[in-house]
Amino acid sequence: MKIELHTINNTKIAEVISDDIVIKSTEDGLDLLGNLYYQDFDKIVIHEKNITPDFFDLKNGIAGEILQKFSNYRVRLAIIGDFTRYSGKTIKDFIYESNKVGQINFVSSTSQALKILSNE
């Protein structure tokens, strides 16, 4: 795993770059949050391919637990991917509400993620 630094308008944004799944469990999500938070990042970009598919099955609670921690620490998160393939009403509503609030954003590109996270 590599962390790519983006600086936009004096805002530091960490982008997680990896060919592997980085978040396999709630603990992995919390470890990533903690490691980047203590490196002075409060805005993080991660790709859908780096998150276990279980995250997108809301019944197991992984997404809720991880995203609650990001909210508690006031760390903004953008998840990049193609979310149109998730057809369930619950996940679609979850993505819609997350994007509406703006703490956690589900976006389709790195440029979109950086634009959203660099706006205060």
Image (tube, rainbow, N blue to C red):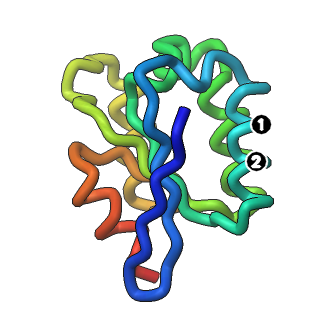
Query: The residue under label 2 is which amino acid type?
Result: Asn
Disc ID at residue 35: 2
Residue 89 is left or right of residue 12, and the answer is left
Query: The residue under label 1 is which amino acid type?
Result: Asp
Mark 1 lies on residue: 31
Residue 82 spot, x, y in % from top left: 23, 30
Residue 8 spot, x, y in % from top left: 38, 79
Asked if 100 appears above or below 24 in the picture, the reply is: below
Residue 65 is left or right of residue 96, and the answer is right
Q: Is residue 117 visible?
A: yes
Residue that extends furthest to the bottom in the rendered view of this protein:
9
At label 2, counting other C-alpha atoms closer than 10 Å, the crowd grade (few under 14, some 14-19, many 20 or more) is few
Which residue lies at the image location 65% right of the left edge and 33% below the top edge?
64
Would you identify the image quadrant in which residue 62 lies?
Answer: top right
Q: Is residue 98 visible?
A: no
Asked if 41 appears above or below 30 in the picture, the reply is: below
